[in-house]
Image: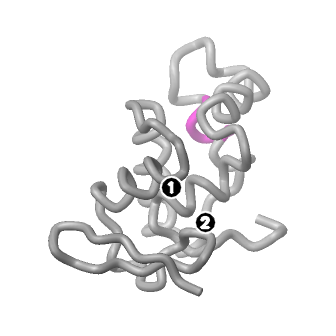
Amino acid sequence: MTRQFHINGKTIETNEQGFLCNLEDWSEQFAEALAREDGVDLHVDHWELIWYFRDYYNENQVNPTMHTMVTTLGKSKGKEFHNQKGYEKHIYCLFPRDPVHELCKLSGLPMPQPDD
């Protein structure tokens, strides 16, 4: 079963979990619509993570893991995020259910595999 979003006059389909059927259909407007439907208000910190995920995927052709995200981004953020556990806690505050899963979905990336 697919879900449909109508964005800028175009119908965009996702699987039942919200992952794009066609990765090329991603746009910021799609991410906003999906986030709204999932009850997430996107702010600057959310967008930084979404763009990090998209850039990482474009460079590596794989989804980033929580470990990769925390070690890479945590060091580039302010001093308060140099502590990896502290930064991971911040990420879970932004995406309480499953940060990697949610970020892949909002970033228009493939569904992460169980070992990602």
- Is 99 situated above or below 91? below
**Secondary element at tag 2:** loop
**Secondary element at tag 1:** helix
In the picture of the structure, the residue carrying the numbered disc 1 is: 53
Q: In the image, residue 87 lies at what x, y percent?
A: 67, 27
Quarter the N terminus occupies: bottom right
**Within the magenta stretch, is there residue 73?**
yes
Q: Amino acid at mark 1?
A: Phe
Quarter the C terminus occupies: bottom right
Inter-mark Cα distance, 2 to 1: 7 Å
Q: In the image, residue 35 lies at what x, y percent?
A: 46, 50
Relative to 12, 107 lies left or right:
right
Q: In the image, residue 33 lies at what x, y percent?
A: 37, 55
- Is 14 situated above or below 44? below
Of callouts 2 and 1, the N-terminal one: 1
CB within 8 Å, label 2 to label 1: yes
Relative to 28, 88 lies left or right:
right
Region rendered in magenta: 70-74
Disc 1: CA contacts within 10 A as few (<14), some (14-19) or many (>=20): many
Q: Return the residue found at the far top.
A: 80
Q: Residue at x 53, y 43 (%)?
A: 39
Q: Amino acid at mark 2?
A: Asn
Q: Residue at x 59, y 33 (%)?
A: 94
Q: Quadrant of residue 88?
A: top right
Q: Residue at x 42, y 81 (%)?
A: 13
Q: Residue at x 40, y 41 (%)?
A: 47
Q: Quadrant of residue 110?
A: bottom right
**Within the magenta stretch, is there residue 85?**
no
In the picture of the structure, the residue carrying the numbered disc 2 is: 63
SS assignment for the magenta stretch, majority: helix
Q: In the image, residue 27 lies at what x, y percent?
A: 29, 63
Which is nearer the eye, 104 or 60? 104
